[in-house]
Image (cartoon, rainbow, N blue to C red):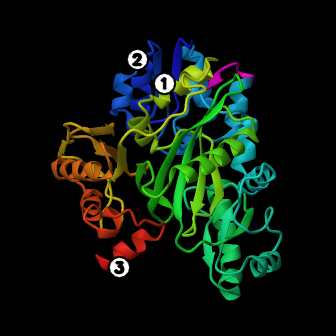
Amino acid sequence: MFKKILIANRGEIALRIISACRELDIKTVAIYSEADRDALHVRYADEDVCVGPYPSAASYLNISAIVSAAEITEADAIHPGYGFLSENAYFAEILQDCHISLIGPSPEAMRKMGDKSLARRTVAAAGVPTVPGSPGPLESVDDALSFARKAGYPVILKASSGGGGRGMRIARDERELSGAYETARAEAEKAFGSSEVYLEKYLDAPRHIEFQIFGDLHGNIQHLGERECSIQRRHQKLIEEAPSPVLTPELRREMGAAAIAAAKAVHYTNAGTIEFLLDAQDRFYFMEMNTRLQVEHPVTEEVTGLDIVKEQITVAAGQPLSFAGKELAPRGHAIEFRVNAEDPVTFAPSPGKMTAFHPPAGIGVRVDTAAYQGYVIPPHYDSLIAKLIVNGRDRAEAISRARRALDFFVIEGIKTSIPMHRKILDDPDFVDGRLSTRFMERFAAAS
């Protein structure tokens, strides 16, 4: 087992990893930028190292500074959390060269699944359904127009190296596609350093369903069930739940088998997520794979009883999956709400000092956060303040507990997304589980 783990991240996920390490009796090293000097992950880690000024490129994305911090503190492994360097194959290769373990998949798996068009070809060869579209990166706007005519409008352009909704453009006819092509390429180049884009048939109102995958170094690959992630804005998830209110046991088995086949195609190890789109006829299509821990992993923990972060660490240390060979059926229902520092109407960022911070508690309520009263939310990073996770014996009880928890969640001094979440909980479509990726469009128009 590892003796000391450096956490190459910040905020609530850094604290989450510290908690797992504490239970495993592993020492921790926190890195931080100058803007995070007063952050809780710095306080709770056994050691801490400042890796640069507030811009991410000079600190949390500064590979040489992070590796140096690991070597100076004699950390034998690094956990990247999510975001930042968590899906950076080059970083993973550097750690291999430095004989530092990465708590994550191999660089080869990252690279193959990180290239979205290559990932589509890889899983299609393994028999996993994919959305009709271009088999690889587009060569020109004429290439895009040709594939769009075959797939049928509407279509969506996606950055080959992308994620988080950046480098995506929807086109409903040839005129829109001609105009969106260069825009998508420019945005992809700015966000990911590669202007490559590919094209898919755009499913107008699908559900977004992802499967938590886990593989170990002994050849075991299993899934931990699905999460419903359909409520999102501009491809950014807002609410996630497990299990999905729409999946039948038969569809769950079929999608789960496809998720495992996709992971096996790249000999995947550690935690990852296979993301699908599900249409109204229960046809599902591979969308992408996230080769890291997900923000929404707690809902899977709540319905399986597993500690996914501890499992990541033990698997990276060479131990087999603790649940190898066992079928994990979901127990009860869990929902996660991302509480962000932003205006609940305009979604404009709202950084600043929290003059009051009182998270809810009680049965069925969990709050993952690194915030505290008096903490100043910096404007330089993600706006996530906390994750509110509720669970119940069924979806109705989870919703009831979510209403109570959101009513008791007090944050003052800044604007947050709490009022928006509270309104969603009273929306008839949400209560009845009638969800799609266009839920927020309809909800915003009706508000």
Q: Earlier in the sequence, mark 3 or mark 1?
A: 1
Residue 304 % position (x, y): 44, 34
Q: Magenta residues? A: 97-102
Residue at the (59%, 30%) spot, across then down: 65
Q: Mark 3 points at which residue?
A: 445
Q: Mark 2 points at which residue?
A: 23
Q: Which element carries disc 1, helix, strand or loop? A: helix
Residue 442 % position (x, y): 39, 76
Instruction: Tell me whether the residue at label 1 lies in contact with that at label 2, contact meaning CB atoms closer than 8 angstroms.
Output: yes
- The answer to whether residue 365 shows anywhere in this view is yes
Give the quadrant of residue 41. Answer: top left
In the shown orientation, is residue 325 left or right of residue 107? Answer: left
* Count of numbered marks: 3
Q: For residue 310, which numbered disc appears in the image?
A: 1
Vertical placement of residue 126 versus 133, above or below:
above
- Estimate how packed mark 2 is, as few (under 14), some (14 to 19) or many (20 or more) residues with alpha carbons within 10 Å: few
- Amino acid on which disc 2 is placed: Glu
Report the Cα–Cα distance between label 2 and label 3.
46 Å
